[in-house]
Image (tube, rainbow, N blue to C red):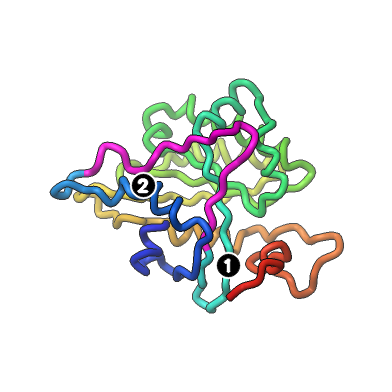
């Protein structure tokens, strides 16, 4: 997403600003170091957080096709946190989800193809944990399936995950993506990333109404962000 924005190639969006541009640049630096067209061994820097109680966030401000400013705050977390949530029910790091506008569940498309049952099972557990954390709210949810260039998402597996989410009143949209693609796959690098950001900006179903709504408020003009002002 960051690299596409940097080259003005993210479909439907243009880069406007970032309060964490150096961190984004550091994380994505590995993806820019290609040797004679060969993929680097490590695309991104492994996320490490010094305190286990604080989530890190990346900020991007984008302009959509209507020149509407939208601020994206995306958590940058170690993968171990998801494992400990599922395996050990360690929820103390995840309370920030109570403020989430949209829930994203990322699934490795390769594992969904090669280890379908175990991947579906763990994804269901992750959805159960997340739903319990945000309850009684039911924010829009998105299932992001990676490596679309190499694997066709299994319809049966996806349906099982969708049905599990519905048990907790989460209506999930499925968005397949391919950040970096194989030359012979016929899929363009960055496939689905623009569609994914679109689901963040214009989620479906709509966000729940606030009890005392701000009539001048929208997803992309949240009061907390307006307090700092925009230039």
Q: Secondary structure at mark 1?
A: strand
**Residue, far bottom:** 66
Residue 158 visible in rendering: yes
Query: Is residue 65 or residue 74 the one in the foreground?
Result: 74
Of pointers 1 and 2, the one earlier in the residue sequence: 1
Q: Magenta stretch: residue 210 in it?
A: no
Q: Is residue 129 above or below residue 96?
A: above
Q: Secondary structure at mark 2?
A: loop
Residue 103 screen position, x and y as percent: 61, 47
Q: Quadrant of residue 53?
A: top right
Report whether 16 appears left or right of 190. Answer: right
Residue 148 screen position, x and y as percent: 36, 47
**Residue position for label 2:** 148
**Residue, far top:** 88
Q: Is residue 19 above or below residue 85?
A: below
**Residue, far left:** 36
Q: CA distance from mark 1 to mark 2?
A: 27 Å
Residue 128 visible in rendering: no
Magenta region, residue range: 39-60
Report whether 99 appears left or right of 24. Answer: right
Residue 156 screen position, x and y as percent: 49, 37
In what quadrant of the picture does the C terminus appear?
Answer: bottom right
Tell me what residue is drawn at x 24 percent, y 48 percent: 33
- Magenta highlight: main SS: loop
Tell me what residue is drawn at x 55 percent, y 34 percent: 50
Q: Nearer the viewer, mark 1 or mark 2?
A: 1
């Amino acid at each position: 997403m960051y690299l596409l924005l940097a080259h003005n190639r993210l479909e439907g969006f243009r880069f406007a600003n970032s309060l964490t541009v150096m961190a984004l640049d550091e994380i994505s630096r590995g993806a820019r170091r290609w040797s004679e067209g060969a993929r680097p061994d490590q695309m991104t820097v492994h996320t490490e957080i010094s305190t286990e109680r604080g989530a890190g966030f990346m900020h991007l401000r984008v302009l959509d096709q209507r020149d509407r400013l939208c601020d994206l705050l995306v958590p940058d977390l170690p993968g171990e946190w998801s494992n400990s949530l599922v395996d050990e029910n360690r929820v103390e790091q995840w309370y920030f989800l109570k403020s989430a506008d949209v829930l994203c569940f990322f699934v490795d498309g390769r594992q969904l193809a090669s280890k379908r049952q175990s991947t579906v099972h763990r994804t269901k557990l992750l959805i159960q944990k997340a739903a319990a954390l945000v309850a009684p709210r039911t924010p829009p949810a998105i299932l992001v399936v990676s490596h679309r260039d190499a694997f066709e998402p299994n319809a049966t597996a996806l349906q099982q995950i969708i049905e599990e989410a519905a048990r907790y009143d989460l209506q999930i949209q499925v968005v397949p993506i391919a950040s970096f693609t194989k030359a012979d796959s016929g899929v363009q690098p960055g496939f689905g990333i623009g569609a994914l950001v679109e689901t963040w900006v214009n989620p479906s179903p709509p966000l729940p109404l606030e009890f005392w709504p701000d009539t001048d408020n929208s997803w992309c003009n949240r009061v907390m962000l307006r307090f700092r002002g925009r230039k």
